[in-house]
Amino acid sequence: MNNEQESKEIIKDIFFEVFSNLDKNDFSWEKEQKDYENWDSFAQLNLITFAEAKFNISFTLEESIEIKSANDLLRIVEHYLT
Amino acid sequence: MNLIDFLGTNVEKQGNKIAIIDDETKITFIELYEKVKKFSTNLEILNQEKIISLVSENSISFIVAYLGIINSGKIVHLISPEISEINLFNQLKSSKSKNIICNQSVKNKIFNYNSIETTIFDIEEILLKQNNEKIKSSINELAYLIYTSGTTSEPKGVTVSHSMIEFTTKNIVKVLGYSNSDIDLLPLPLNHSFGLGCLHTSLYVGSTLVLLKNASNLDQILKSLKKYKITTLASIPATLTKILNFENKKLEDYFSEIRLIITNSTAIPKKTVIQFKEILKKGNLATYYGLTEASRSTFMIFDKNNGREESVGRCSPNVEIKIINEEENNLKFGNILIKGDNVIKKYWNNIEADKNIFDNWLKTGDTGYFDKEGYLFLKGRSDEMINIGGEKVMPIEIEQTIKNIPGIEDAVVFGIEHEIFGQTIKLNVIKSKNSDIDKSQILSYCIKNLEKFKIPSKIDFVEKIPKTDYGKVKRFMLK
C-alpha cells in the first residue's frame, strides 16, 4: 500500500468512528457535510481531532473550516504529508 | 470536650497503653500527656502570642507541639513543610503569627528564606527547657488555623474550633466504628484536615496511631500493615490505585486484618473501589465528603451490597446538605451547601470569603446531586465547568471515563481557549508503566463512551499532574 492509499484507509476509518451509524455503502469521498445526518460543528471538531492524532499534524483554523467532505480532509492531510 | 480532654480521658482509662508509634519510637498516653504539659508551660514562658505557626513532618514531636500549643491557650497555625517562601510569607502576614515552631530540618530550610523575619523555635529545644513554674491557661475556643492550599490560587484561612472537632470526631466514630482496639495507620500529613481528623479520632477512642512520613512509600505502607497488625488505614485514592498496580498478587494477604480503609472525596476510580471490595475480606473501603471548612459532611461505606461506587455517601449525623442552582431553587443538580456544627462560622480575616457563609449555610463551590435514596454524587467545582459552544461539561465525568481505559494511570481534563467554540477540552494523560497506548486509541474509546462535545480536542502525554498533598488536582496550574 502506498502512502496515499494508507492515508485514505485511515481517513475512512476516522469517518466510520466519528459517524458510528455511517454504513460502508454510504461512504463516498465526494459526499458533502450537508448530506450527512449528524455532521454538526462538534462532529467537525472530532474529525479534526482524530486526523491530528492519527497523522501527528496540526490544522490551522482556516483548514479546519474548509473541510466539507472526506476528500477535503484527504487533500489537507496529503498537503502536510508531502 | 476539647482535644486535651480527649487525651486526659485516655490517661485516666489506659495511661500505659501505647498512644503513638513513629518508626522505632513509641509513647504511651501518660508520657504524651506529660510532654504536652511540659511543652505548653515552656512555650507560655517564651511568649504571649495567641497564634503560633507549626511546621513539621509527621512525628511524635509534631503531636506534642500541636497539643502543647493548644494546651497553652493558643491557636495552632498549621503549615506544610513543603510550603514555598512566598506562600509562607503570605500566610504569616495574613495570620499575624509572629512565631514559628518547627523541626530541625524545616528550621534549616526556613532560615534560608530572606523574606521571613519571624522568630523560629525548634520543637526539641522548647521541650528541653527547664521550668518549674506552673501555668494554667484556659483553652482557646479555636484549636487550629489552616490555609486551604486547595485547588484554587488564593488560599483562605480556615479556623476550626474545639466544638467543631468534637462534633466531627464523634460522627467519625459513630459512622465508621472506631474503638480503642484499633491500630490505625496514618501515612498522611498531619497539617491537613484529613490527617488531623484521624489523629483526633485515635486520641478520642484511645486507639494506637502508627505514623508514617511518606504516603508515596508503598512498600513501607504494605510492610507496616503486617508489622503493626493494622486494623484501619487512612489513604488518598491515588495511593490505593497505585497499590493495586504495585503488588496486586499478595494484596489480600497484606489487607487480611484490615477492617477499614478510609479515603477522602477526591474522585476514586470506580475500578479501584471494585477491586478493593474484593481484596478486603474482613472490612470495607469508605470515603467521605468534606472541606477544611466543613469536615466529614458525608460518609460512604462501600459495602458489597451497595453498588454506588461513585457516590460520597449520605449526610453525616446532624449535618444538612442542600443543592441549589443560580436561582437558589432546590434542584436535582447544582451547587452544594452545607450546614451543621462541623461548619465554620467565618474565615480568618477575610470578609470577601465570609460571603460564602450565610444563615449558617456554607457555599462549598462544589456541584453535585442526590439520588432518590439520599446518596450524594459530586460533579466537580462549579468554577471548573467547561463551556464548549454552549454545552457545559464537568471535567470529572470525562476523567472518570478515561481512567477506565487500560494503560492509563491518571488523567485530567480542562478547558482551553478555542476560536470557534470559546473553549474545547484538553486532556493530559499519564500512561501506566509499560503502556504503549496512543492518542488514537484514547479517542476511539472516548467516541464510543462519551457524547461528541465531550471528546478532547487536544491530548498530551505527561509525566506528572499537579496535585495537592491530598491528591486534588491544582487546576489553575494546568496548561
Image (spheres, rainbow, N blue to C red):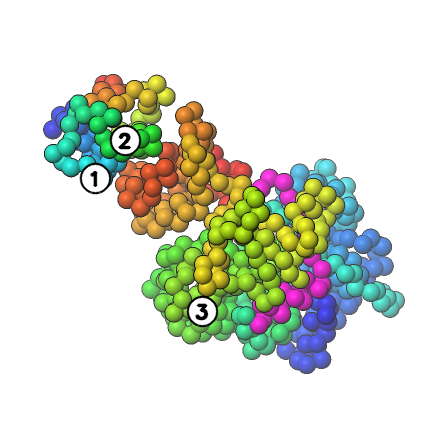
Residue A4 can be seen in this image = yes
Q: Percent position (x, y) of residue A71?
A: 20, 22
Judged from the image, the secondary structure of the residue bearing numbered disc 3 is strand
Residue that carries the numbered disc 1 in the rendered image: A21
At horizontal 25% and vertical 18% (from top left) the residue drawn is A79
Which chain letter matches label 2? Answer: A
Looking at the rendered structure, the kind of residue marked 1 is Asn
Callouts 2 and 1 in the same chain: yes
Horizontal arrangement in the rendering, residue B222 relative to residue B5 (left or right): left
Tag nearer the camera, 1 or 3: 1
Q: Percent position (x, y) of residue B364?
A: 59, 50
At horizontal 36% and vertical 48% (from top left) the residue drawn is B401
- The reply to whether callout 1 and callout 3 are in contact (CB within 8 Å) is no
From the viewer's side, name the closer residue of B351 and B180.
Answer: B351
Horizontal arrangement in the rendering, residue B389 relative to residue B330 (left or right): left
Looking at the rendered structure, the kind of residue marked 2 is Trp
Looking at the rendered structure, the kind of residue marked 3 is Asn
Judged from the image, the secondary structure of the residue bearing numbered disc 1 is loop
The residues tagged by marks 2 and 1 sit, at their Cα atoms, a distance apart of: 12 Å
Compared with residue A78, is residue B229 higher up or lower down, i.e. above or below?
below
